Image: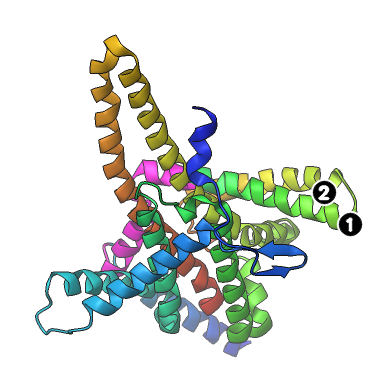
Amino acid sequence: MAESLFEEFEIHHLSDPLFSIGGHPVTFTNSALWMFISIIVATMLMVVTMRRQAMVPGRWQMMTESFHNMIANLVRDMAGEHAKPFFPFIFTIFAFIFFSNLLGLIPHSLAVTSHIIVNFGIAIMLFIVITITGFIRQGFHFFGIFVPPGVPKIMLPVIVPIEMISFAVRPFSLSIRLFANMLAGHLVLLVFAGLTASLVAAKWLAGLSVLPLGMNIAITGFEFFVAFIQAYVYTILSALYLRDALEGH
Amino acid sequence: MGNDQEREGLDDLSARIRAAGKKPGDTHESIEGEVAGDTSDAARAGRVGYEFVGTILGCMLIGWLLDRWVGTSPWGILVMLAIGFGVGMFNVWRALNGYDQSVGLHKRHEK
């Protein structure tokens, strides 16, 4: 039982090595498959629901429009007015994470966001975009974000390295948050499912198995909420970090 | 000299105008407070926790990579662990005192 707990998160090769990078063979894995599926589902949902742009939106169009408005408001509020060109980028991050989280709840699927490297990949991409944008927009004034206003000069040798390190470790805390939430949620589901199975197997206690089963149903509902909230939090923090690059001080 | 003083006076005035324009309960402000996920104490506590752990793990990873490249094992990871602990603490302090998550000592909503 114990070894099968992490079976859900295992990565399998679905193809022969396609090509190799630095001696490491690259294969098409189930992780890649589910990433593709979430991209396709997200794209299809956006395209199909907005195909007929009715003046009075139907149910599906309404859903897509409210997603769009939510992220547009978020980008404007958190990253400032200048962040409009970055809206597609931020929205893509949101859609990818949200649909990965949701599709991960399908039995026998893989929640790609429960692998930290996926989240870290997105975070490091964001980090590179933010740094490059900062230098393009502000030149060397971008370093000014490491010098908080109103700090006494004598404190600067302490504060500046601290700021630099907190800037550098942002991708980590961003990806750990999403990873930990997804992994923990799935593990809790697995533990309660295992408990249900064990109770059913123990004959005279089989009646008790409704308790963990009910718990599992409730947690599944909660996981839908977590899937949305974590995608949303990731997006908020991305937009917030983007503001540094756009506005500085 | 007089010019400088005048300039200072103008800066002060524009700061005051900005402050007056930003009423508490301004829609912008309330939206920001909501989406920042700090509406409940639990959300704030969760944020602080991930910030702390993320900083320490991130610093450890940087130290480990440094060790591998420069060959200073185990000093890189130890020093970076200590630094990460300090920075993590600083970030926790910053979060608890209502500074926002952008770099620097900005009070939330001040920008």
Which residue corresponds to mark 2? B76
Chain of the residue that carries numbered disc 2 in the rendered image: B
Asked if residue B96 can be seen in this view, the reply is no
Residue A221: x and y, percent?
A: 26, 44
Chain of the residue that carries numbered disc 1 in the rendered image: B
Q: What's the residue at 40%, 47% (across, down)?
A: A108
Q: How many marks?
A: 2
In this rendered view, identify the residue nearer to me: A193 or A243. A193
Q: What's the residue at 54%, 80% (across, down)?
A: B8
Residue A200: x and y, percent?
A: 31, 20
Asked if residue B99 can be seen in this view, the reply is yes
Residue B31 counted in the magenta span: yes
Q: What's the residue at 62%, 47% (across, down)?
A: B88
- Cα distance between the residues tagged 1 and 2: 9 Å
User: Please, what secondary structure does the residue beneath circle 2 have?
Assistant: helix
Query: In the rendered structure, which amino acid carries the disc numbered 2?
Result: Gly
Q: Is residue A28 above or below residue A199?
A: below
Q: What's the residue at 73%, 44% (across, down)?
A: B81
How would you rate the neighbour count of disc 1 (Cα within 10 Å): few for under 14, some for 14-19, many for 20 or more?
Answer: few
Query: In the rendered structure, which amino acid carries the disc numbered 1?
Result: Val
Q: Is residue B109 above or below residue A56?
A: above
Residue A167: x and y, percent?
A: 62, 62
Please state which of the two labelled residues, at mark 1 or mark 2, is closer to the viewer: 1
Q: Is residue A132 above or below residue A14?
A: below
- Nearer the N terminus, badge 1 or badge 2? 1
Which residue corresponds to mark 1? B70
In this rendered view, identify the residue nearer to me: A68 or A214. A214
Q: Which residues are magenta?
A: B25-47
In this rendered view, identify the residue nearer to me: A98 or A169. A98
Picture quarter with the C terminus of chain A:
bottom right
